[in-house]
Image: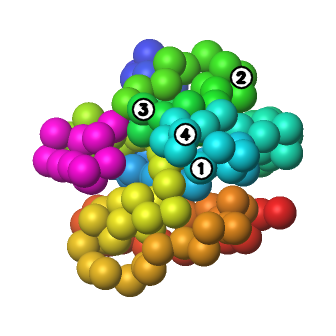
Amino acid sequence: MKYFLILAFALSFIIPVNVQEQSKSSTTTFYLIRHAEKDKSDETNRNPNLTEAGKTRAENWSKVFENIDFDAVYSTNYNRTRQTAEPTSKKQELEIQSYDPRNLYSEEFSEATLGKTVLIVGHSNTTPAFVNAIIGEKKYEDMNHHDNGSLYIVTISEGSKIDQVLKIN
């Protein structure tokens, strides 16, 4: 009887942890941002780097995200998006993974990110388009070309999708 009580007592601490872990793993959260300020001095350059202001913003994004434990960081394969993602990926010790901006939120991407917390860095047109693809409706228009501070957050839990946009300056 004594061992039964000890076992019951021990299980009372283990079961709530398992329930919490199952709940967490069934929730997927996406944080989507546009790349920081890019160098516009050469209009023919289709793959510019970030300006000093852009590098500062990228570092500031990493501070905004410092209390979020990302499982993955995704970026398009352009200098400006990768450079925006880099400070956060380095602090979180994650490798930046590439995604194809012409194939947003595919079934493969959905499965790879299921139950995870993910940062996605894109462009003024792909970031809202990605959000629209995740939520399954055309809710967000292309971003203003001067908007480098919008943060889209989409949470999927038990089939329910919640989306919001925050302005971070």
Quick check: marks 3 and 2 in contact, CB under 8 Å? Answer: no
Residue 91 falls left or right of residue 79: right
Nearer to us: label 3 or label 2:
3
Q: Which mark is residue 45?
A: 4
Q: Magenta stretch: residue 104 in it?
A: yes
Q: Taking 39 as reference, is 150 above or below it? A: below
Q: Residue at x 36, y 66 (%)?
A: 129
State the image coordinates of residue 79 (x, y, percent, origin top left). 56, 31
Q: Residue at x 44, y 16 (%)?
A: 3
Magenta segment:
99-109
Q: CA distance from mark 3 to mark 2?
A: 20 Å
Q: What amino acid is at disc 2? A: Lys
Q: What residue is shown with label 1?
A: 43
Q: What amino acid is at disc 4? A: Asn
Q: What residue is shown with label 2?
A: 91
Q: Residues within 10 Å of mark 2 (few under 14, many from 20)?
A: few
Q: Nearer the viewer, residue 24 or 101?
A: 101
Quick check: marks 2 and 1 in contact, CB under 8 Å? Answer: no
